[in-house]
Image: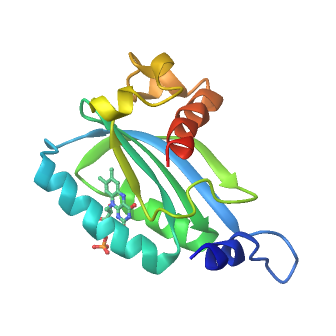
Amino acid sequence: MARNEANIGTMVTTKGSTVLHSVLYVSTAQVLFTAPRMEELLTKSRASNARQQITGLLLYRDGAFMQFLEGPEGAVERLFRKIKADERHFAIVTISEGAIPQRRFPDSPMGFHNLRDHAVRALPGFAEFAETSLSMSEFCDEPGRAMQLLGVFERGR
Ligand SMILES: Cc1cc2nc3c(=O)[nH]c(=O)nc-3n(C[C@H](O)[C@H](O)[C@H](O)COP(=O)(O)O)c2cc1C
């Protein structure tokens, strides 16, 4: 796995530029995401992402999502188009999008955390996000802060 991921991370086009791409967005759930519904979304997403060499992280809190996707540019863009058209959520706002030098979640086709979980609240670095909602207004002007929140789970892996 690690060796494959290293290869993915250094994939280059014929022009020599890296094709590893990322998207970070926030959105609002349209439907109530019960545990079984979330489980179903995660199971399907993980299987599909693994086939597409997409990795990343999905965070949820009180009806709001934040998702970070990383992988081959075409695959990430195709998936993000599908996600934007998904009627289970709305108010999808892109916080950051672009090329990345390497993956942040190379071992995880889609990690998931509910920020209300006790285990999350105990993670190093989470305390300053304890009252933060996953809303556009929290992160749009401060994409770096969203990246910092992702970092809590990167270290916690
Ligand atoms: C918040 C949210 C996150 C999602 N994340 C993914 C994902 O990481 N991978 C994935 O394949 N589908 C994800 N989906 C589901 C897609 O929107 C879509 O339903 C899925 O890709 C199946 O599309 P298809 O039936 O056209 O193959 C997500 C949906 C929501 C609401």
Query: Which image quadrant for residue 49?
Result: bottom left
Residue 52's place in the image compared with 22, above or below, is below
> Is 31 on the left-hand or right-hand side of 147?
left
Query: Which image quadrant for residue 6?
Result: bottom right
Residue 10, percent from left and from top: 76, 72
Residue shown at 47%/62% (left/top)?
Answer: 108
Image quadrant containing the N terminus: bottom right
Residue shown at 63%/79% (left/top)?
Answer: 4
Q: Nearer the viewer, residue 118 or 132?
A: 118
Q: How many marks?
A: 0
Question: Which quadrant contains ligand 1?
Answer: bottom left
> Is 116 on the left-hand or right-hand side of 122?
left
Residue shown at 78%/69% (left/top)?
Answer: 18
Q: Nearer the viewer, residue 134 or 55?
A: 55
> Is 36 on the left-hand or right-hand side of 136?
left
Residue 77, percent from left and from top: 54, 65
Residue farthest along the right direction in this orientation = 15
Residue shown at 70%/69% (left/top)?
Answer: 9
Residue 92, percent from left and from top: 40, 42
